[in-house]
Amino acid sequence: TAVNPAELLAIATTIAREAGALVRRRRDEGVEVAASKSSPEDVVTFADRESEDLIRARLAQLRPHDGFLGEESEATGGTSGLTWVVDPIDGTVNYLYDIPAYAVSIAVVEGEPDPASWTALAGAVYNPVLDEMFSASRGGGAFLGDRPLRVSERSELSLALVGTGFGYSAEKRTRQAEVVEGLISQVRDIRRIGSAALDLCSLAAGRLDAYYESGLNPWDIAAGALIASEAGARITGFQGRPAGKELLLGAGPGVFDELERALVELGVVPR
Ligand code: IPD
């Protein structure tokens, strides 16, 4: 059967809204950490798992032939050539502290479930606290609710508000802090929002002029990168390679080159 991005997008937004409501409800009931992952800072809550289970079950009903790649459970392949890439709560530490910057991220991609080679077809990022639904389908534009999104037209790095994030290993964080130390005097200011998915949606909405981070996972960026690029952002990886684990750099066309140069000069670490 032919792929219909609008239909896939409707599935992504419906399920993201349902999972978002669940996550929000669990937050109000009080959050418990279920386990630490790569480091003590890298936690998973019971709500992460419950949200992923819900998303997985809904997709299995509606799209039984598609593959699944989520942050909290084992990946499964499908026979359709499509894979759903899911972060059940992006911004888990914000979630833990009740900082209203976390989201459910659901995307569907064609090809290998690897950002270096996939084609994202549709994606939804839902912040259940602000009730903000960011969405995009390939070639169909990006939206916040039903409002079309456009990246900022900022043209000077010195006036740009730049988002970034830090990985969970001490060594990586120290290196990332050194890059921030060099960058801070060259830009308007730096934000560490704490959710890569929302950073990318903020870029799409002109709430940030640029965003970069290294060490991201496929589920952190699958929906957000499509939303940002459909809103007119340039998104790449390290030195023109595809955006992925080593680096994701996204910006409006007016500041992209200047930011890339600055980051290379500061020795941004690709990994
Ligand atoms: C994390 C957030 C954070 C980013 C980390 C991610 P999680 O995802 O997106 O902003 O800096 O690199 O791992 O663990 O909250 O799903």
Image (cartoon, rainbow, N blue to C red):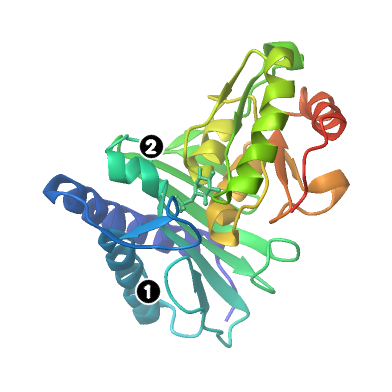
Camera-side residue: 216 or 225? Answer: 216
Residue 221 position (above or below residue 234): below
Q: How many residues crowd around disc 2 within 10 Å: few (fewer than 14), some, or many (20 or more)? A: many
Image position of 264 (left or right of 69): right
Q: Which residue is mark 1?
A: 56
Q: Earlier in the sequence, mark 1 or mark 2?
A: 1
In this view, the residue in front, 174 or 93, is 174
Residue 233: quarter of image: top right
| Residue at the spot of label 2 | 101
For this view, does 36 lie left or right of residue 204?
Answer: left
Measuring 32% from the left and 67% from the top, which residue is drawn there?
49
**Above or below, 63 relative to 50:** below
Instruction: Identify the amino acid type marked 1.
Output: Arg
Image quarter of the C terminus: bottom right
Residue 80, position in %: x, y? 58, 83
Q: Residue at x 58, y 25 (%)?
A: 208
Say whether residue 140 is visible: no
The x, y position of residue 51, in whole percent, is 31, 63
* Along the viewing direction, whichever of 173 and 30 lies nearer the viewer: 173
